[in-house]
Image (cartoon, rainbow, N blue to C red):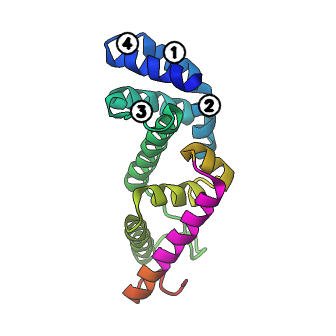
């Protein structure tokens, strides 16, 4: 029944009834907030992101192809928006930790940390979009397989398989390149 209601209200919004989007917001705001809060672990930031997610969903509503559940599509758009936001924020405000323990960051340490970040981004870029998202949800946001499965509407064993394959793919890439920060790890 929920799926039929979603289809109806999506159609209403696309037909020009902007008030129908309020129903979608009311139905999903608490669930979306709970998911985003687990990702960012900050209430105010989660509220802002949820608002941005609904704006993004509204703007992309015409791209929803009515294949699968609307909730899954909404979560996917929202998670992608959050991940894009995290990446942009990380690129603009990269905070480097002092791995040497000496209390001051030398230019060499900063350079090595930037290189490590670039190499990690390069490895992640070799993955398919959904696999990259699953890896980021697992290791950046520390979500469980169950939470990832619920967000993406896929079985837990699929999440586990995709993470396993993604790690193997990244491992092979590192071994082929024979160098860099991650080479010694594998």
Residue 3 position, x and y percent, is 54, 26
Question: Circle 1 sits on which residue?
Answer: 23
Question: Circle 2 sits on which residue?
Answer: 31
Q: Are circles 3 and 1 on residues that touch, CB within 8 Å?
A: no
Query: In whole angstroms, how far apart are the C-alphas of marks 4 and 2?
Result: 22 Å
Q: Is residue 103 magenta?
A: no
Predominant secondary structure in magenta?
Answer: helix
In the picture shown, does residue 71 fall above or below 101? Answer: above
In the picture shown, does residue 83 fall above or below 170? Answer: above
Residue 127 position, x and y percent, is 41, 65
Circle 3 packing at 10 Å, graded few (<14), some (14-19), many (20+), is few
Residue at image position (65%, 48%) is: 147
Query: In whole angstroms, how far apart are the C-alphas of marks 4 and 1?
Result: 10 Å
Circle 1 packing at 10 Å, graded few (<14), some (14-19), many (20+), is some
Query: Under tag 3, what secondary structure?
Result: loop
In the picture shown, does residue 153 fall above or below 10? Answer: below
Dot placed on the residue nearer the N-terminal end, 4 or 1: 4
Q: Quadrant of the N terminus?
A: top right
Tell me: 132 left or right of 92.
right
- Closest to the camera, between mark 4 and mark 3, is 3
The range drawn in magenta is: 154-171
Residue at image position (50%, 69%) is: 166
Tell me: 8 left or right of 46.
left
Dot placed on the residue nearer the N-terminal end, 4 or 3: 4
């Amino acid at each position: 029944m929920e799926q039929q209601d979603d289809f109806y209200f999506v159609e209403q919004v696309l037909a020009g009834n902007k008030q129908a989007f309020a129903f979608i917001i009311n139905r999903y705001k608490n669930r979306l907030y709970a998911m985003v809060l687990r990702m960012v672990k900050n209430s105010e930031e989660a509220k802002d992101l949820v608002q941005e997610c609904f704006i993004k969903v509204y703007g992309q509503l015409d791209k929803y192809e009515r294949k699968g559940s609307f909730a899954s599509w909404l979560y996917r758009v929202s998670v992608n928006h959050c991940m894009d936001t995290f990446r942009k924020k990380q690129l603009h405000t990269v905070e480097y930790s002092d791995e040497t323990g000496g209390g001051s960051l030398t230019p060499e340490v900063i350079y090595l940390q930037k290189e490590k970040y670039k190499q990690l981004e390069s490895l992640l870029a070799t993955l398919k979009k959904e696999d990259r998202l699953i890896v980021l949800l697992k290791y950046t946001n520390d979500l469980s397989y169950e939470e990832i499965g619920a967000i993406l509407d896929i079985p837990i064993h699929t999440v586990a398989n995709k993470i396993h394959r993604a790690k193997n793919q990244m491992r092979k890439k590192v071994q082929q390149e024979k160098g860099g920060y991650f080479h010694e790890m594998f």
